[in-house]
Image: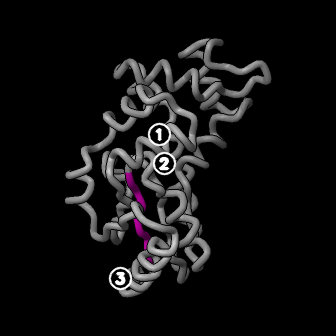
Amino acid sequence: MRVVGLTGALGSGKSTVAALLAARGAVVLDADAVTRDLQRPGQPVHGAIVERFGSAVVRPDGGLDRRALAGVVFADAAALAELEALVHPAVHAVIDGQLADLAGTEAVVVLDVPLLLESDHYRVDGVVVVDCPPEVALRRLVEERGMSGDDARARLARQLPREERLARADVVVDNSGTLQALERRVEQVWTWIHALPDR
């Protein structure tokens, strides 16, 4: 088993790179997908979030209003830390279990974790950072995800500085060009992954 960490700023195109790696046979463990699953109604994490942040972050159907929750926590560092304390340990437990299930196999595992470099929880064999100019990421967040410019800037400002992310990368994937150029770069990354020592 080889385990590669995949990260990048919001709007960098990390999910696209993860999908291209999955198409080549990688097992992608997506922290955001795990988080969404843990935040479904009836899950303990959902209950803990509602207990802490109140009914204002709940939609009429009982699901979390993620936009309302983001509006609360991204304006308040203490609230964000409280949310992370409720969510991150549960996400770590799920992904640790998934990794344990894959141990001893020939799998290429891609840990798609937005805060990979901010956390010291995961042990990876290499780090792939997806990168694009900040103005490109900002435009994507506004045009493709429907965020306001202020919201997108606030979220980007809370992430690790771009220079530090790039300095800690083993491989950088530039995603400021065409999809064809990205696919060629991902093919190079796939070759690099297979040259890593097996665990």
Check the image and report above or below for 120 versus 173: above
Amino acid type, callout 1: His
Q: Is residue 199 visible?
A: no
Amino acid type, callout 3: Leu
- Residue 140 image offset from top left, x and y in percent: 49, 46
- Alpha carbons under labels 1 and 2: distance apart: 6 Å
Q: Is residue 65 visible?
A: yes
- Residue 157 image offset from top left, x and y in percent: 31, 34
Q: How is the image coloured?
A: one colour
Secondary structure type for disc 1: helix
- Residue 72 image offset from top left, x and y in percent: 48, 18
Task: Name the front one of labels 1 and 3.
Answer: 3
User: On the image, numbered disc 1 is attached to which residue?
Assistant: 88
In the image, the segment drawn in magenta is 2-8
Q: Residue at x 47, y 39 (%)?
A: 88
Amino acid type, callout 2: His
Q: Residue at x 20, y 59 (%)?
A: 167
User: On the image, numbered disc 3 is attached to which residue?
Assistant: 196
Mark 1–mark 2 contact, CB under 8 Å? yes
| Residue 36 is one of the magenta-drawn residues | no
- Alpha carbons under labels 3 and 2: distance apart: 24 Å
User: On the image, numbered disc 2 is attached to which residue?
Assistant: 92
Q: Residue at x 42, y 20 (%)?
A: 79
Secondary structure type for disc 3: loop
Nearest to N terminus: mark 1 or mark 3: 1
Secondary structure type for disc 2: helix
Check the image and report above or below for 168 versus 87: below
